[in-house]
Amino acid sequence: MLIPKKARLDILTYLFSEGVLVVSKDPHLKKHKQIGVKNIYVMKLMQSLRSNDYVHEVFNWQWMYYSLTTPGIEYLRKVLHIPDDTVPKTLKKQAGPPPGERYGGRGRGRGRGGRYGRDEYRGPREGGSGFGGGFRGRGRGGFRGRGRGGRGGRGMGGEAASAEGF
């Protein structure tokens, strides 16, 4: 397919700067959301790059995910006349916080690092429970799930099953 030179350069420049590209498998889509050229141009150019092993493709739920390979980076440097010291964003190291200061800096096993500790979450211990002094539980306690058979269910046998005509 013949792709206009400006559209081809826009696609290749975006691919080199990001290192990855996502394309919807919809050839009738007017424009690609990130690049602004026809989606069919992006699809066909990426198909051509994939056939030369310049990109790696993953297809999932009508979307194609492309990532540059090392030969693809070299090819795009040659085509776009980019110096060797420039690399795609996927190869750049992100400047993160020092290892000791991640996730609140309190070390391992401390939860989410919110404002409250475990005791504040559960509430005061004065009245026997955390729900105000006058609350008393009204139940038998314990878990009584709906098992197989047993009382009140539609299990095997019993009055409930025979009364309904099963």
Image (tube, rainbow, N blue to C red):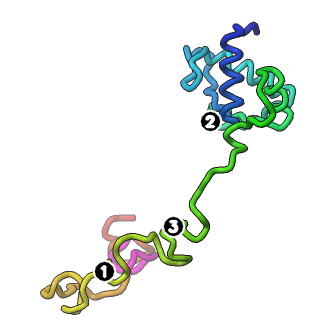
Q: Amino acid at mark 1?
A: Glu
* Closest to the observer, 9 or 28: 9
> Which residue is label 3 attached to?
103
Residue 5 image position (x, y, % from top left): 71, 9
Residue 117: image location, x then y, percent: 37, 79
- Which badge, 2 or 1, is on the more N-terminal residue? 2
Quadrant for the N terminus, please. top right
- Residue 71 — which label? none
Q: Which residue is mark 2?
A: 61
Q: Residue at x 68, y 15 (%)?
A: 41
68 versus 10 height, above or below: below
Quadrant where the C terminus sits is: bottom left
Is residue 145 highlighted in magenta?
yes
Q: Is residue 86 left or right of residue 40?
A: right
Residue occupying the point 61% across, 27% down: 24
The image shows residue 4 at horizontal and vertical percentages of: 70, 7
Q: Dividing the picture into quarters, in which one does residue 74 lie?
A: top right
Q: Which residues are magenta?
A: 144-154
Mark 1, other Cα within 10 Å: few <14 / some 14–19 / many ≥20: few
- Where is mark 1, residue-wise? 120
Of the pair 11 and 93, the residue shown nearer to us: 93
In reply to whether residue 158 is colored magenta, the answer given is no
**Dot 3 or dot 2, earlier in sequence:** 2
Q: Residue at x 76, y 21 (%)?
A: 80
Q: On screen, 40 above or below 158?
A: above
Q: Please, what secondary structure does the residue beneath circle 3 have? A: helix
| 2 vs 1, front mark | 1
Q: Is residue 133 left or right of residue 19?
A: left
In depth, the one of 99 and 19 nearer the eye is 99
